[in-house]
């Protein structure tokens, strides 16, 4: 870093500090290096006293709480094609200057251009395209409003018609509704920072379940804060549903597209956020009546079904089926008994025939005709004797005749 004489300035230290003039000179040198710049902002103060050679303005950033002092020749203000007032959006060309006497920085401008309506609308359209590409307008990001919010946050102008409409309509619909009202500017350079502060406070309050941002209609310039990119991104990041209630129709600010619900007017916002107690009670009564009617119809329908079932013969006279078949059962029993008796008779007759045949062929009839049966009884297995060889001398035998039996023994030499 060089000094004004072209020499090298030694570095400062505790033993060799710079004087204030050296620091001021160095700051001025670095600021002067910026050269000519174009700057956009909003005019918040204009001080151009008659007879003075310098006019003083304050140029403010509409999206942040920052401003810079601006100086110019009063003729530059007079040559402006449109009147310059507080809140006018302008683009200026100038060179930053550092005033070492006061240690302040200002922008000395040589040209000032008001931003026209067409250019403002074009910038809004460019921002609309950018945010749409990022998905901030996507319907899937929209959060539903609660049926009956615990507390409604309201951001609006102090004692404005929009504020009165929202509160009056909401209390008319539900007398117990509670509001957390935050008064902010709704136009001009201070609107966006104030709205951002109150929006963050309401979003952080767990009691607030829906936030309404409301103002009446206005010109394109008046509605510029509601198309500010910083505000739009803050609304998209809120965890609490936000209702946009800007009273307008022709020129829609981008807040309508980013908010979870777009209301045509502040009155419409109150209707969307707060249910109508009269309508809800009427709906409950209608639902109860419809439920009772449906229940009665169901009971009557089921009763008719039961009556139809009871009217059927099988249930009206359950024994008729048995009675109608009793004769068939009795006839079947008679037939069964007849068949059994016939079968028994046939079998008895057959048994008699077999018994007669058996008696004819049996040994008793043979014995009756004079025959006898000789059995040996002195052996382990007595049996009928079929040959004289089975009758050795000394053998004991049993002789059976028709009317009894006798025992005998075989003597040696007997002629069998």
Image (cartoon, rainbow, N blue to C red):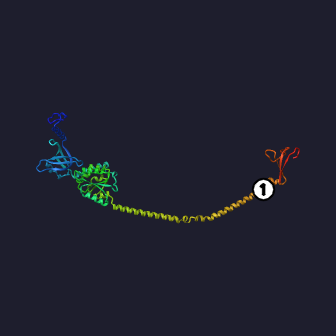
Instruction: Give the percent coordinates (x, y) of residue 197.
Output: 26, 50
Instruction: Give the percent coordinates (x, y) of residue 69.
Output: 18, 46
Out of 357 and 24, give the one closest to the viewer: 24
Q: Quadrant of the N terminus?
A: top left
Instruction: Give the percent coordinates (x, y) of residue 216.
Output: 25, 57
Q: Residue at x 44, y 62 (%)?
A: 295
Question: Is any part of residue 134 visible from this angle?
Answer: yes
Circle 1 residue: 357
Horizontal arrangement in the rendering, residue 17 relative to residue 132 (left or right):
left
- Mark 1 residue element: helix
Horizontal arrangement in the rendering, residue 371 relative to residue 88 (left or right):
right
Out of 281 and 29, give the one closest to the viewer: 281
Question: Is any part of residue 265 visible from this angle?
Answer: no
Horizontal arrangement in the rendering, residue 209 relative to residue 343 (left or right):
left
Out of 123 and 14, give the one closest to the viewer: 14
Is the residue 41 above or below the residue 2 in the image?
below
Residue extending furthest left?
Answer: 51
Count every numbered label the image shows and give the total: 1
Horizontal arrangement in the rendering, residue 116 relative to residue 152 (left or right):
left
């Amino acid at each position: 870093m060089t000094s004004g004489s072209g020499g090298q300035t030694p570095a400062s230290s505790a033993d060799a500090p710079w004087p204030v003039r050296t620091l001021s000179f160095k700051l001025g040198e670095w600021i002067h290096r910026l050269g000519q710049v174009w700057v956009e902002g909003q005019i918040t103060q204009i001080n151009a006293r008659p007879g003075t050679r310098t006019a003083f303005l304050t140029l403010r950033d509409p999206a942040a709480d920052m401003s810079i002092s601006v100086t110019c020749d009063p003729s530059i203000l007079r040559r402006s094609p449109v009147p310059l007032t507080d809140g006018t959006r302008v683009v200026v060309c100038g060179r930053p200057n550092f005033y070492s006497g006061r240690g302040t920085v200002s922008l000395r401008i040589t040209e000032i251009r008001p931003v026209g309506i067409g250019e403002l609308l074009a910038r809004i359209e460019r921002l609309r395209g950018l945010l749409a590409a990022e998905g901030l307008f996507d319907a899937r990001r929209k959060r539903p409003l609660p049926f009956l919010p615990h507390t409604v946050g309201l951001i609006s102008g102090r004692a404005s018609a929009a504020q009165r409409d929202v509160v009056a309509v909401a209390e008319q619909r539900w007398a117990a509704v509670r509001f957390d009202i935050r008064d902010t500017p709704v136009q001009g350079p201070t609107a966006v920072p104030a709205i951002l502060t109150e929006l963050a406070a309401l979003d952080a309050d767990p009691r607030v379940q829906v936030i309404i941002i409301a103002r009446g209609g206005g010109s394109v310039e008046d509605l510029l804060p509601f198309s500010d990119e910083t505000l739009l991104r803050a609304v998209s990041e809120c965890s609490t549903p936000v209702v946009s209630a800007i009273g307008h129709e022709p020129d829609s600010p981008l807040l309508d597209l980013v908010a979870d619900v777009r209301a045509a007017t502040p009155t419409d916002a109150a209707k969307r956020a707060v249910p109508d107690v009269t309508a809800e009670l009427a709906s409950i009564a209608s639902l109860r009546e419809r439920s009772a009617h449906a229940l009665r119809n169901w009971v009557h329908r089921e009763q008719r079904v039961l009556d139809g079932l009871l009217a059927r013969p099988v249930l009206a006279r359950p024994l008729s089926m048995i009675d109608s078949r009793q004769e068939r059962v009795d006839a079947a029993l008679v037939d069964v008994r007849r068949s059994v008796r016939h079968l028994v008779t046939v079998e008895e007759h057959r048994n008699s025939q077999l018994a007669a045949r058996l008696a004819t062929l049996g040994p008793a009839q043979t014995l009756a005709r004079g025959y006898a049966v000789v059995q040996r009884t002195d052996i382990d297995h007595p049996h009928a004797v079929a040959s004289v060889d089975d009758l050795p001398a000394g053998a004991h035998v049993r002789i059976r005749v028709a009317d009894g039996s006798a025992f005998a023994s075989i003597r040696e030499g007997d002629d069998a």
